[in-house]
Amino acid sequence: MGDHAPLLDARSISIHFGGLRALAEVSVQVYEGESLGIVGPNGAGKTTLFNCLCGQLRPDNGSVSFAGRPIDGLPSYRRARLGIARTFQRIEVFPEMTVFEHLMVAERARRGDGRLWKDLLNLGRPRRDELENVEEMLSLVGLSDVAMTPVAALSLGHCRLVELGRALMLQPRLLMADEPSSGLDTRETQVLGDLLRYVQRERSVAMILVEHDLDMVARVVDRAMVLDFGEMVAEGTLREVMANPEVRRAYLGRGA
Amino acid sequence: MSSFLDYAIPGIPYGCGFALLAVGLVLTFRATGVFNLAFGAQAFLSAFVFDLLNQYAHWDQPASFALAVLVVAPGLGLALDRFLFRHIPTASSTAKVVSSLGLLVAIPEMIPIIFGGRTRHRIGYLWLSPNLVYFHLGSTPVNGADIATTVITLGVVAALLAMFRWSAAGVTMRAVVESRRLSQLEGVNASRVAAGAWALSSTLAGLSGVLLLSQSNSIDPTNPLAFTTLLVAGITAAALASMESISVALLGGIGLGVLENVLVKYLPPGSVLATGFLPSLPFAVLVIVLLANPRLRHIEQSSDPMASVDPPPPPPAVSTRDPRLAAPMKWGFRILMVAFVASVLTWVPGNWVFVLAQGIVFSVIFLSVTMITGMSGQLSLCQATFAGIGAFTAGRLAEHLGLSVLAGALVGGLLAALVGIVLAVVVSRVSGLLLTLVTLAFAIFADNVLFQFSWSGGGITGVDVPRPAIGPLSFASDRYFLVLALVILAFCMLLVVLVQRGTVGRYLAAMRGSPGAAASLGINLTSTKVVVFAMSAGLAGIGGALYGSAEGPIASTDFSYVLSLVWVVVVITTGATTVEGAVQAGMAFAVLAQVLSYLPSRLDGLEFVMFAFGALTYAKHPEGIVEYQKARWLARVSRLLAAWDARHPGSGQPSLAGSGETASAAPAGSVELSNG
Ligand SMILES: Nc1ncnc2c1ncn2[C@@H]1O[C@H](COP(=O)(O)OP(=O)(O)OP(=O)(O)O)[C@@H](O)[C@H]1O
Ligand SMILES: [Mg+2]
């Protein structure tokens, strides 16, 4: 996989909040169809890294390119249109909408189809192919029977699936999932893991997975890297990484 | 050079008033996240109380000062904190601004109701007499009030800075500003600190009001408008300071005062520019500051590393309407409409026909608030200005080109939309709060300058907007005009509903739910907001033209910026998220004004006060208190129906029983309850 250019290439990303250095010279490469796990203790900067990659935060230093073109100046909606989709660690759903509407709005956004005049002429109703796409995604993420429920009435596990389905509606080339299993029970985690693996293997979507649940990481990712205090301390296969003494110190030194 | 100083020196004490207000704004914003527009009204209240005690009750200055500035001002600040803002710490900044806006409208309207109207005899002053010249700077005479204002302002700000640097209370306050959550973990009582900030900044606002009393004849303690203009100057100075630095806010305020005075020298005396531009100078400066100061772009983003601990703001109530209610409601509405039109055409007395027509026209204008505030979650304070643009355009086109008023209304709407686009693009890079401030400043600018020219609003002389006619069909009589307005309203409602249900509406709903997630789907929030702002301005323009046509001759005072504030407050109270809300607002606004006109004239502003208090509930019930109550009643009826179903299995709607619908209705209902 290493012989062609990476899909996502982020080099020496640094950012600080006031006096706090949240990321220091972190580089990430993800290849087409590959899945990368990022692990690290709380506050290591994993979510901050996501935010820098998807354009929600501007790093102080460093550059990001996607599919061979630099995307440093692009706002997050432009990056999304290039094919970077994400989910959020703190659930970010649209409380007024049903599950179906979440997917539909993502479908519309993917087509870049939000013209006011079309709405005024009542041309904004869902078309058949859109409905088919949404139905298909609903059954893929297993939300068909709650499709018409407002998300405000759904459990956390369902909301995570809504976020995942919504991100996948964009037909992304790269999916970034931020602790998708946090707050879920073992059964729900199992389902989610299967789903991620399916998406990544069968649809060959490249993936970055931030996760505390190492079983899940082991099942889904090809390669892992470890962040601690904003610095990358190890990179390799998950087994290599977890054997690294520095990683054991970062995790177990404080955790155990 | 010396003549330059002659103009600049009097600007210093004048600017001190702005500076104190700006410092107060920065202080509360930093400590509590509230951008308190009500400081304008609070300054007015203290000035009014001071004047009342000093001039009418013949108290001496220290006693009047003590009560007005040291008791009333901080007392009001503490009350606001205790009864309002403390309960909405995690509300969006728009919700907080709406609450302060309600106060900005309510306080000045309540004063004449409580104290009765007063006219002013002579100028009160706080410490040294403005009639005594103490010395000359160059050739500029410096009077007692100038000295007093400058010395007091500088002294107070210096004391404040010293407090922040050295005293324990100041250090605690700085910690809370950095991270409310972390300092709470350290055992700091953040609510007490917030209360302190409220008391302190309200005192500053009160002091600024009292000091400005003696500064200028134009600031009349019975005229709250003067204090709103003062507020915009304060906002500008606070923006200059990036909402951060107290000393920059001080310098910014003084600088504005000086600039205003120096410009007097260079502008042609007596021209519209000279009389109108000066009060709206802060607008120009504010726009420049917003564009040039990149630090303002992110002032609303929390920099608290512990912010994620806060619970998210309450989601809007999920409406649980039993599907069986839909048909009776639809038919009830249709029957009501037919009865309404029939009544208007037959037995309703003439003066009430006019009131109802006004209500319909207001409804058209208020749909623009539904779009901008209800759908896009932004607060625009210049809807009356857009309405004015529409009205004056239609009037002038009819006057000069003989264009039909209906065509004129369309052109006016387009023009308003264009202005809206320019405004929205200017502020598109900055956050929602700044849009609010820029629109307020723009409204004041339009009121003072744009509508004063003889080719536009014609100042107080005004413009005549005729009643429309289509071919031989004339709508000159109120009854026919009402029917025409109703048709236009229905059409506008349809447009708004189409947008609401269409893609743009869904994008906006996504944006209201989570801007970050909406952007992560590839939705361009900026352009969506600009488009909606333009359409909203266009609707206001069309509604404004109709309003002009209903009223006959109209003048700039009919579209005063204060109306924008009032309108927003009215719509927010009745419900800004639905088209019905706008219609309720329009009818209620017109009808209530008519009903209250039967009461003693002292109660003139009562309807404003009522709506303004309604708006205070916005943070808790963003869908509007009236819509909220309606939803509650419908939910209650739905529950009764469901209970009936449970007791009588087999009746009702068997088709629903097995499907997902009933399963989803129960949790949805419980969400609605937990918000209540
Ligand atoms: N907007 C912000 N302002 C200030 N500090 C921030 C901000 N966002 C994150 N931080 C800080 O940056 C550091 C990294 O945070 P981040 O959320 O990226 O960690 P994380 O690895 O995702 O942790 P977790 O496993 O808990 O999700 C933390 O110390 C956090 O407090
Ligand atoms: Mg995280």
Image: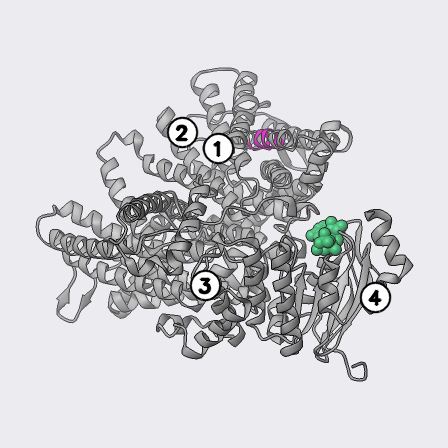
Name the kind of residue labelled 1 in the image: Phe
Secondary structure mostly seen in the magenta stretch? helix
Separation of marks 4 and 3 at Cα, in angstroms = 39 Å
Mark 3 = which residue?
A: A145
* Element carrying mark 2: helix
Which residue extends farthest front?
B649
- Image position, residue B284 (x, y; %): 55, 54
Q: Is residue B615 above or below residue B107?
A: below
Q: Earlier in the sequence, mark 4 or mark 3?
A: 3
Asked if residue B200 lies in the magenta stretch, the reply is yes
Q: Which of the two discs, 2 and 3, sits closer to the camera?
A: 3
Q: Quadrant of residue B387?
A: bottom left
Separation of marks 3 and 1 at Cα, in angstroms = 58 Å
- Image position, residue B503 (x, y; %): 44, 68
- Image position, residue B583 (x, y; %): 29, 52
Q: Which of the two discs, 3 and 1, sits closer to the camera?
A: 3
Separation of marks 1 and 4 at Cα, in angstroms = 70 Å
Mark 1 = which residue?
A: B44
Mark 4 = which residue?
A: A239
**Side of B490 relative to A114 (left or right):** left
